[in-house]
Image (cartoon, rainbow, N blue to C red):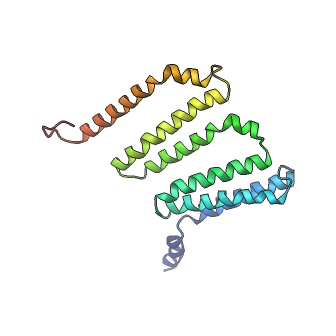
Amino acid sequence: MARASYGAPFQRFPHKLLVFGITFVLVGVVLLSRTVGYMPEVRVLWTIVPLVIGAILLYLAFAQGGPEGYVFVGMILTLVGIVSLLLNTVMSSVELARIWPLFMTIAGVSLAVYARTKVESARVALQIPAVAIIVLSGIFLLFSLDIIQRDFRRVVGMWWPSILIIFGIVLLWVYYSRGRRRPPSGRSN
């Protein structure tokens, strides 16, 4: 009997340890950055608002089965909050200009993780853009960190046909991965 009453609150709010844990970490980071001197003014705290709203939307989408639109809006608000907080505390705009592709990587990885929760057809439809975002962010990161010293336009002008090759390989992979699961029907796509 005690077990049933103990489990009832967990059913209404199943991931409360996760939510409270993230909340305490975020509040602790903000307060620590204030006491250490990285956050000189209290008015900088407005930057946390999109971060918190984004985290709430992501929680509702993943843990509570909320609308799929919450994932993208939550991801964007979370990234905007992180960037705003970094720019107003420890990072200059010059440093941000160098690492901005990392935020694309985070978005791509988030989309790939979200795709794993979907059925097979929707999973493939979400994983393809996720991989594309991750690959593009890696390419942009090579240029923004000056690992590739050439002009971006020249490199794109030379290598743009590789996009067609990659797109064709992805289409072939999707075609053959679908073909292995279905019995032959005599028709071809």
Task: Tell me residue 130's x, y (percent).
Answer: 48, 42
Asked whether 164 or 81 is in front, the reply is 164
Task: Tell me residue 28's x, y (percent).
Answer: 75, 57
Q: Quadrant of residue 141?
A: top right
Q: Is residue 62 visible?
A: no
Residue at 79% across / 45% down in the picture? 90
Residue at 35% across / 51% down in the picture? 119
Residue at 53% across / 70% down in the picture? 10
- Compared across the picture, whether 21 is left or right of 186 comes to right
- Compared across the picture, whether 81 is left or right of 157 comes to right
Q: Is residue 68 visible?
A: yes
Asked whether 78 or 21 is in front, the reply is 78
Q: Residue furthest left?
A: 186
Vertical order, 144 against 65 (above or below): above
> Which image quarter is the C terminus in?
top left
Asked whether 112 or 104 is in front, the reply is 104
Asked whether 101 or 157 is in front, the reply is 157
Vertical order, 170 against 148 (above or below): below
Q: Residue furthest bottom?
A: 1
Residue at 78% across / 41% down in the picture? 92
Task: Tell me residue 8's x, y (percent).
Answer: 50, 75
Vertical order, 72 against 94 (above or below): below
- Compared across the picture, whether 119 is left or right of 130 comes to left
Task: Tell me residue 42's x, y (percent).
Answer: 83, 60
